[in-house]
Image: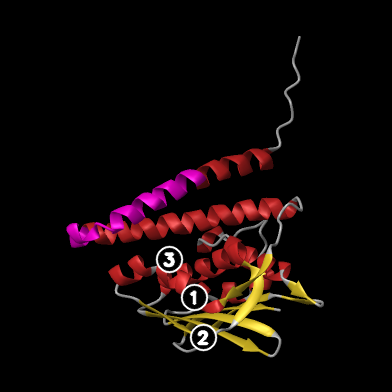
Amino acid sequence: MSKTVPAIDFASVLASTVHDMKNSLCMLIQSTELIQQESAQLSGNARDELARLNYEANRLNSNLLQLLSLYRLERNQLPVQIDQHYMADIAEELVLKNQFYTEQRKLQLQTELPDNLHWFFDYDLVMNLLNDAVANALRYCDRRILLTVSQQQQLLVLEVHDDGQGFPEFMLNSDAIDMNTPDLANNHTGLGIFFAKLIARAHNNKGVRGTVELRNGGRYGGGVFRLTLP
């Protein structure tokens, strides 16, 4: 007598697995940060490898968070917690998150923003989005990255400028990205920009939604990631 195999909700299984992976990865990141405190006792090569390990672990952690957020968004289970946040605190945390890597690689991550500027948004979602943009700039820049924050009319505008080669043409046309047909030939899944646009659009005020734009040029002639929030 044959037994019926119960249907498997693969998306739910994957989400649970990703959640467990993320917990383990967070412990790994904490371990690398503890070792960083003793990094003066390490050789130059060991410090370089530690910086790279910490960078890649944080990048993977960001990707896993994006997957979980997309899963919750698809099932209408992604709450957007809107609170007031001071942009100086956001900028400082982004610098601190990437300080060890930038110092070890001799990169410059600078910020430019007015005093006392504050805005309303979901801290976790926007912080992850911005940190992913900074991590991408760190990966492809030559030496310099600049985070600018400003208020333009009724919008908060955040930009990440770098002095690299800029975004390739297929990424500049990000509206055409199809998550069902990832561009594996260019080693580009589109997950990062897809996630960024979803999070931006989840922030709306009086019918105006947030946006994400990629372009080339900017302060340093490289890539520019631009996020606007109403």
Q: Is residue 131 above or below residue 217?
A: above
Q: Quadrant of residue 126?
A: bottom right
Q: What label does residue 113 carry, if any?
A: 2
Badge 3 is on which residue?
97
Q: Quadrant of residue 108?
A: bottom left
Q: CA distance from mark 1 to mark 2?
A: 9 Å
Whether residue 190 is visible to the viewer of this picture, yes or no, is no
SS state under label 3: helix
Q: Residues within 10 Å of mark 2 (few under 14, many from 20)?
A: some
- The three-letter amino acid code for the residue at tag 3 is Lys
Q: What label does residue 51 carry, if any?
A: none
Q: Residue furthest top?
A: 1
- The three-letter amino acid code for the residue at tag 2 is Leu
Q: Main secondary structure of the magenta part?
A: helix
SS state under label 1: helix
- Magenta stretch: residue 196 in it? no
Asked whether 136 or 117 is in front, the reply is 117
Q: Quadrant of residue 225?
A: bottom right
Q: Residue at x 74, y 30 (%)?
A: 7
Q: CA distance from mark 3 to mark 2?
A: 18 Å
Badge 1 is on which residue?
91
The image position of residue 183, as x and y in percent, is: 58, 61
Q: Are marks 3 and 2 in contact (CB under 8 Å)?
A: no
The image position of residue 117, as x and y in percent, is: 58, 83
Q: Are marks 1 and 2 in contact (CB under 8 Å)?
A: yes
Quadrant showing the N terminus: top right
Q: Residue at x 48, y 54 (%)?
A: 60
